[in-house]
Amino acid sequence: MADGYERFIADMKQLTGIDLSLYKEEQMRRRLTALKNKYQAADFHEYFTLLKQDARLLDECLDRMTINVSSFFRNRKRWTYLEEHILPKLIEKRKGKLKIWSAACSTGEEPYTLAMILSKFLPLTDFTILATDIDAKVLEKAQTGLYDERAFQECTKDEIKTHFTQEGKLYRITPRLKQPIRFKKHNLLSDPYERGFDLIVCRNVLIYFTDQAKEKIYASFSESLMPGGFLFVGSTEQIFHPHTFHLQSSATFFYQRMKEEVALKN
């Protein structure tokens, strides 16, 4: 098109490693057009030139591209189901440390929520949480662990008191809750996936990807799970043919990796 969007996609992939062609075009183009217009760029080529010249504009663009919206215990009922039905199964069958991945963790609320829940069942030394995101800027905020009141809409007062210390109008996560968490930059569409996870949490992210990209990610998640492990997805991210990925629906928004002999039968 005349606005240079296709060229912009290629330029951004070369500059940042992010392949925008694997995101739903209508949603991504709308967000980026708003930014382009904000800086009165004539087209996407001119906007890309601005991004190369100003790191602050590039950071803003990356933040808009990667949709960093999060809170503790987001959609609380889902976390309650995880706590009451999924984690007991994993803890019962575990042979060593539980290995968990919070994929596309944004500013850290999700992995810290996982640590809060798991600390009810296990010592902090008995589980590990890999927390990844494509955006290095939000990972820095996650590691800092400093949040305002908007992040606590679904937290109880006791949870805030137990796991945070107040600093003025902000709240800092306690150092002990950081111990089992390892933060790492990771691109779901291009970087290698670690293996051996008992639980992978990836919520409210895949809705922005094309069907082709989703299939690639679901297949990679499945390979990263231990047999019997679980994938926890978002409210609008139902997997329509889970058996294709050696997964079976365990409950709404939860999919379990089938054991090899079961997968072969399907």
Image: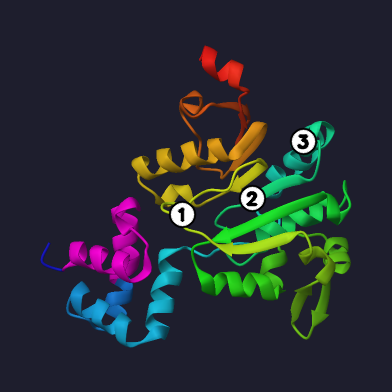
Q: Quadrant of the N terminus?
A: bottom left
Whole-number angstrom distance, CA of label 3 to CA of label 2: 14 Å
From the viewer's perspective, is 63 left or right of 81? Answer: left
What is the three-letter code of the residue carrying label 3? Leu
* Residue 209 colored in magenta in the image: no
What residue sits right under mark 2 in the picture? 101
Image marks 1 and 2: residues in contact by CB distance under 8 Å: no
Q: Callout 3 environment at 10 Å: few (<14), some (14 to 19), or many (20+)? A: some
Magenta stretch: give its range: 4-33
Whole-number angstrom distance, CA of label 1 to CA of label 2: 15 Å
Q: Callout 2 environment at 10 Å: few (<14), some (14 to 19), or many (20+)? A: many
What is the three-letter code of the residue carrying label 1? Asp
In the image, residue 117 above or below residue 237: below
Rendering coords of residue 117 (x, y %): 80, 51
Q: Characterize the magenta stretch by its predominant secondary structure.
A: helix
Q: Which mark is residue 242?
A: none
Dot 2: what SS?
strand
Dot 1: what SS?
loop
**x 65%, y 41%: residue:** 196
Whole-number angstrom distance, CA of label 3 to CA of label 1: 27 Å
Q: Which of the two marks, 1 or 2, is nearer to us in this view?
A: 1
Image marks 3 and 2: residues in contact by CB distance under 8 Å: no
Sequence-wise, the earlier of marks 3 and 2 is 3
From the viewer's perspective, is 157 left or right of 145? Answer: right
What residue sits right under mark 1 in the picture? 191
Residue 44 falls in image quadrant: bottom left
Rendering coords of residue 127 (x, y %): 79, 50
Rendering coords of residue 215 (x, y %): 41, 38
What residue sits right under mark 3 in the picture? 90
Q: Which of the two marks, 3 or 1, is nearer to us in this view?
A: 1
